[in-house]
Image (cartoon, rainbow, N blue to C red):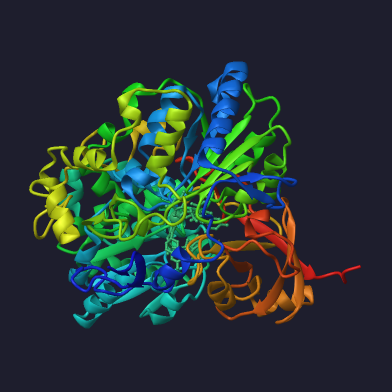
Amino acid sequence: MVDVRDGKAETLAGDPTHPFTRGTLCAKVNHYLERVYHPDRVQHPLKRIGPKGEAHFARVTWDEALADIASRWNTIAAESGPEAILPHSSAGVQGLIQTSSLDARLLGSMGCSNLDRNICGAVASAGMSATIGVGSGIDPEEVVHSRYIVLWGTNTIHTNLHYWPLVREARSRGARLVVVDPIRTRTAQEADWHLQIKPASDAALAMSVMHVMIRDGLVDRDYVAHYAVGYDALVERAREYSPATMAAVVGLPPEDIERFAREYATTQPSLLRPLIGIEHHRNGAMQFRALACLPVLSGAWKHRGGGLARSTHALHFATLAMDRVLMPEVHKPARVLNMRDIGNDLCNQDLRPQVRALMVYGANPMVSMPNQNRIRQGLLRGDLFTVVHDLFITDTARYADYVLPATSQIEHLDLSPAWGHLYLALNRPAIAPCGESVSNTELFRRLAAALGRTEPYLFESDESMLRAALASGHPWLAGITYERLWEEGHVRLNCGDDWRPFAAGGFPTRSGKAELYSEPLREAGLDPLPSSGDLATGDGLQLITGKTLHFLNSGYSHMDRHRRREGELFIELHADDARQRGVATGDVVRVSSERGELHAICRVSDRLRPGVAWMPFGALTDARGTRQGVNALTPEEPTDWGGGSGLYDTFVEVAPARATG
Ligand SMILES: Nc1nc2c(c(=O)[nH]1)N[C@H]1C(S)=C(S)[C@@H](COP(=O)(O)OP(=O)(O)OC[C@H]3O[C@@H](n4cnc5c(=O)[nH]c(N)nc54)[C@H](O)[C@@H]3O)O[C@H]1N2
Ligand SMILES: Nc1nc2c(c(=O)[nH]1)N[C@H]1C(S)=C(S)[C@@H](COP(=O)(O)OP(=O)(O)OC[C@H]3O[C@@H](n4cnc5c(=O)[nH]c(N)nc54)[C@H](O)[C@@H]3O)O[C@H]1N2
Ligand SMILES: [Mo]
């Protein structure tokens, strides 16, 4: 909720009537207005006047920028084909049409390259889908009914603050809280039990839990018999995964695995809550596939508050008329490039056609995609024409030929399908756009006009698209009109009270049942049964690079307040690992991987297991002031399936820094 006086937003506060957020804002959004009115905000179109990467820009008019962009794109499309133009966008804009609508219609109808947007959640969804047909589970709010909660690879207190009060409520009703994480995070510290496993060994742990459940007769045989396929094959497979065999892989004593399995299976309702931590590994999809088998074997889906709760995004999108928004019927067939490969794709001279124009919006790939040095090399290409639409001169924008000013969330209209709950919100603009900034939709209307396009579908209004999205006829949207959302701000999807999606099976897989054995995976040449997956190995320490409290991915990282809070780039290591390398807390150390190296301040920490290191992701300055962030170290290795990247399977060496000469 924003208070506006004389056209200027004066205060921004949470909505106390919102049942999920209950009026609180997180450490980042509390300072959202500082971001909106920040002196560094891009206020008008900018054209590059210096070398790429140095951020020397001059103000130009919108007409000038649009005419030049249109003429460059037209030339490139005529000479090399439209696939030489590559969009790169992500979820920087948190909303339905501002994330993707008219951009998809324009670029799709031109036949530009498509982008496979899979860095966040796609692998989890693909893995879960192999078992239960979808990447979503129960309504996360139902956690209050759970008796056994497993926060699995998620640092709730930092990244999902609004969930924590619900977990606390469940605990006050007697629920036990287990955290599975290689790091003793704030969340792990608060748990009843922290299982500090080795990275990427979650599927191995899940397999071992299944072994115990099968061996000890703790499987809900009735549920499995009715609603699952492949149980006998799974029994065979799970034999290999006794706690004694898995202890070394998982890094826990066999007794702990035994006890976890027993508690999990016998305390109902039990709820698994994985977010993104276990997806950023090369076996990421298998990790989620294996996890999704557990509530099938335990029958937890039958109970209120039982099963698995992950992102709710897919539940929102399933209700909305997305085809009406994106209009796939106007898209021309075109190649698909994977976002994680942006560096290689920009540098690849053999790509036919080569990428000659890059259009970045709602994303900051220079910071957030793996193999930063390769991305920098690509962005530095003299013959690459780069346009960036953002609120700030991000580290990607520093390399742009044009930077176009973007509105913030309080300056444009949108619908907000939520990641964490089932309340659909209307994002009403509270103030006029700052300076000459425009929303994503307005940008693509202007680009369409500059390109000489006249089809009405390229110029549809925001309100019209939102009304169309809501008019899907989906029962969960019955009675949820544009007017009502305008009036009430947020409305819960009509899933009814006590919605239990799989209490009586009904899994949207090919067989209609939970697929413990998956025929579609076999046809795709993959292992039809769950397993530990292939755990990445490498020399040195396994580096996990995670979210921070005061940044939103790379967002806020340029703001002094937030930067001060996060401090200088550091690396946390276990005392044994530090000793072996002759480094100590406060030292500047050199961190290197196969992809690159940078400098960080050493912090010896008892939060970590030996062999594991942690660095904060988000900013792009290392401890020597070089413009490098943690993705200078990460590899663009694909995950097993689902298209994402094994970001957290980075192996690094840490050594005392050489003196600067
Ligand atoms: N403050 C803040 N909040 C955010 C964000 C932010 O940048 N800042 N980003 C938002 C975004 S885009 C996302 S996707 C969500 C992500 O939310 P989370 O999934 O909660 O965040 P991550 O930091 O990616 O990872 C969570 C945990 O997974 C652990 N982990 C890493 N590897 C493994 C593993 O192999 N096994 C297990 N069991 N655990 C592992 C990490 O140690 C970490 O504690 O957060 C959102 N919320
Ligand atoms: N090493 C490592 N890498 C990671 C991760 C990790 O944990 N470790 N996490 C991964 C994950 S889960 C994610 S989601 C990605 C995030 O990757 P990105 O989506 O690239 O990250 P953001 O930093 O959130 O970039 C969003 C950009 O959108 C801009 N923006 C915000 N609002 C608007 C708007 O209304 N209009 C426009 N045009 N722009 C806007 C912001 O200013 C910001 O520059 O990073 C991934 N990369
Ligand atoms: Mo994410």
Percent coordinates x, y for residue 546 in the rendering: 53, 64
The residue furthest front is 6
**Going by the image, does 536 lie left or right of 302?**
right
Residue 65, given in percent of the width and then of the height, sits at: 56, 38
* 84 or 629, nearer to the observer: 84
Q: How many marks?
A: 0
Question: Is residue 319 in sight in this rendering?
Answer: yes
Q: Which residue appears at 50% of the width and 60% of the height?
A: 553
Q: Is residue 483 left or right of residue 131?
A: left
In the image, residue 38 lies at what x, y percent? 51, 66
Residue located at (51% from left, 57% from top) = 200
Can you name the residue that lies furthest to the top here?
78
- Residue in the foreground of this view, choosing between 141 and 32: 32
- Residue 212 showing in the rendered view: no
Residue toward you, 81 or 532:
81
Image location (x, y in percent) of residue 463: 24, 43
Up-down relation of residue 605 to residue 393 (above or below): below
Q: Nearer the viewer, residue 415 or 211?
A: 415
- The quadrant of the image that shows the N terminus is bottom left
The answer to whether residue 645 is left or right of residue 510 is right
* Above or below, comparing residue 309 to residue 21 in the picture: above
* 253 vs 343: above or below: below
Location of residue 355 (image quadrant) = top right
Quadrant in the picture for the C terminus: bottom right
